């Protein structure tokens, strides 16, 4: 652990390790934040034929720079574009996947330290697993069976054995498939979670504070989100339904009000808004609050976009060629939306620092134009990303706050922006700590 920024504190290590997460994070607001209207520069287009499927970001070649993965439902493959670190990307390499390849998800499935890709084959009954070689190339696909018409894949350690497992929504069969990983990139036969009416989106996180991953499933057929609490062995308690808007599409988890508990943001496709449900820390949620976005919202991501230390919401509006950004106030409420242009019919988006300037940029998959929009963040607010306890200095207490966030699988600990919680996040946090505060 570095000592170049250390100072003598008034709290002992034992004392701070016993504090609740919200206490170690403090206000987490270190800056005024930049002008919302100038948050993103003009979009740049990458021709990847991403189609209706999806986009993900992660360092697939091990050079410390985020790369782009875009699935193509019409072409039945995945495009990988290696990042140059300045917000631009190299040529696309295509890798075969299954019928209707959609919703790429990244994680280390075989424990070799390299990111792998999982793709839901929406017109079939399986998912494609592409094992990464660590240099930006991938092994030929392997298939793992699910039920029918998979939509979204979530990766996490559901049974506590240290290997990544898989949860997959099956829209046509009202079920979620759970596939436990063997640690070598293969999976046990699926277990089914049934009676979920038209499941679309899915997110994993510890919603009741017991250390086990739970599951939030968007059930479009009943206009709600079903919360399934994990037992830690790959099985789940009976679902509890939480009301949201009409035809909910996707869900994201994060601490939106700074109390240390995971909250939910859900896009409502027919209501043109987002439902925000604040978690109580026991797996239950307060009644929804609604915040307007653009027409036809689908994809949703959470992250601090304006540099004030508070999570914000970004949404892909499939009916209006753009992205809506809701800036958080830190108490679970949000400012009115800001709109930014993207391609036609955007459905999926991902957050990460694509140009190495320390703030979060957006990659947006556009169904109508068959490409990806890159929106580089132009926020010039003075921030100190590694100051997680909010005291304006970098100390050992920031390491402890990071450890708490990482253990809770909070998005704030995803320092490398790849959507997974791995050793790479520790290294990215170490780099941010060593860089110091402005």
Image (cartoon, rainbow, N blue to C red):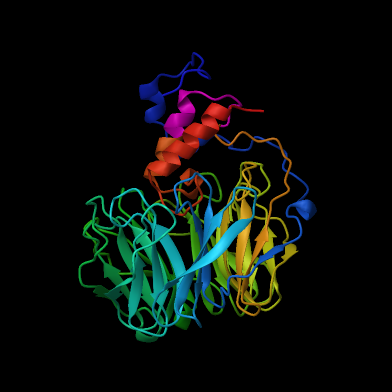
Residue at the location (51% across, 33% down)? 431
Instruction: Give 85 or 409, whichever is nearer the viewer.
Output: 85
Residue at the location (48% across, 79% down)? 220
Quarter containing the N terminus: top left
Q: Seen in the image, is 247 located left or right of residue 111?
A: right
> Is residue 290 shown to the viewer in this render?
no
Asked whether 389 falls inside the magenta stretch, the response is: yes
Image: magenta residue range: 388-401
Quarter containing the C terminus: top right
Give the image location of residue 106, x and y in percent. 42, 59
Q: Seen in the image, is 379 located left or right of residue 252?
A: right
Residue at the location (41% across, 26% down)? 16
Where on the picture, by quarter, is residue 382?
A: top right
Instruction: Give 396 or 72, whichever is nearer the viewer.
Output: 72
Give the image location of residue 65, x and y in percent. 53, 47
Give above or below for 277 relative to 257: below
Q: Seen in the image, is 34 located left or right of residue 104?
A: right
Give above or below for 71 relative to 18: below
> Is residue 17 shown to the viewer in this render?
yes
Give the image location of residue 44, x and y in percent. 71, 62
Total residue callouts: 0
Quick one: which residue is furthest to the top in this view?
A: 8
Give the image location of residue 258, x and y in percent. 54, 44
């Amino acid at each position: 652990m570095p000592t170049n920024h250390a100072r003598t504190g008034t709290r002992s290590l034992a004392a701070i390790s016993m504090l609740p997460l919200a206490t170690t994070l403090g206000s987490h607001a270190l800056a005024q934040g930049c002008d919302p209207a100038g948050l993103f520069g003009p979009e740049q287009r990458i021709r990847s034929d991403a189609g209706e499927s999806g986009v993900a970001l992660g360092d697939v070649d091990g050079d410390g720079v985020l790369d782009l993965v875009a699935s193509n439902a019409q072409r039945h493959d995945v495009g990988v574009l290696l990042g140059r670190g300045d917000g631009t990307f190299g040529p696309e390499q295509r890798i075969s996947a299954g019928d209707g390849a959609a919703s790429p998800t990244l994680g280390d499935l075989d424990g070799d330290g390299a990111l792998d890709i999982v793709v839901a084959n929406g017109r079939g009954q399986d998912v494609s697993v592409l094992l990464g070689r660590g240099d930006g190339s991938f092994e030929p696909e392997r298939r793992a069976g699910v039920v029918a018409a998979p939509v979204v894949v979530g990766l996490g350690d559901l049974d506590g054995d240290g290997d990544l497992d898989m949860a997959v929504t099956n829209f046509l069969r009202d079920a979620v498939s759970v596939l436990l990983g063997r640690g070598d990139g293969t999976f046990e036969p699926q277990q089914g979670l049934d009676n979920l009416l038209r499941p679309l989106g899915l997110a994993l996180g510890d919603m009741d504070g017991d250390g086990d991953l739970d599951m939030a499933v968007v059930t479009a057929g009943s206009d709600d989100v079903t919360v399934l609490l994990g037992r830690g062995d790959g099985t789940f308690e009976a679902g509890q339904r939480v009301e949201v808007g009409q035809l909910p599409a996707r869900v994201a988890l994060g601490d939106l009000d700074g109390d240390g508990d995971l909250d939910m943001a859900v896009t409502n496709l027919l209501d043109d808004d987002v439902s925000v449900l604040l978690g109580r820390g026991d797996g239950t949620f307060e009644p929804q609050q609604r915040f307007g976005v653009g027409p036809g919202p689908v994809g949703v991501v959470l992250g601090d976009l304006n540099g004030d230390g508070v999570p914000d919401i970004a949404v892909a509006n499939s009916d209006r060629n753009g992205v809506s950004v809701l800036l958080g106030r830190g108490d679970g409420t949000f400012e009115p939306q800001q709109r930014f242009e993207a391609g036609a019919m955007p459905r999926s988006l991902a957050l990460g620092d694509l140009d190495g300037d320390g703030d979060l940029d957006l990659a947006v998959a556009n169904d109508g134009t068959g490409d990806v929009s890159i929106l580089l963040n132009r926020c010039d607010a003075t921030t100190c990303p590694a100051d997680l306890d909010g005291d304006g200095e970098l100390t050992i207490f920031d390491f402890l706050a990071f450890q708490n966030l990482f253990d809770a699988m909070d998005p704030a600990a995803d320092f490398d922006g790849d959507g997974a919680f791995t050793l790479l996040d520790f290294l990215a946090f170490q780099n941010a700590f060593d860089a110091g505060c402005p």
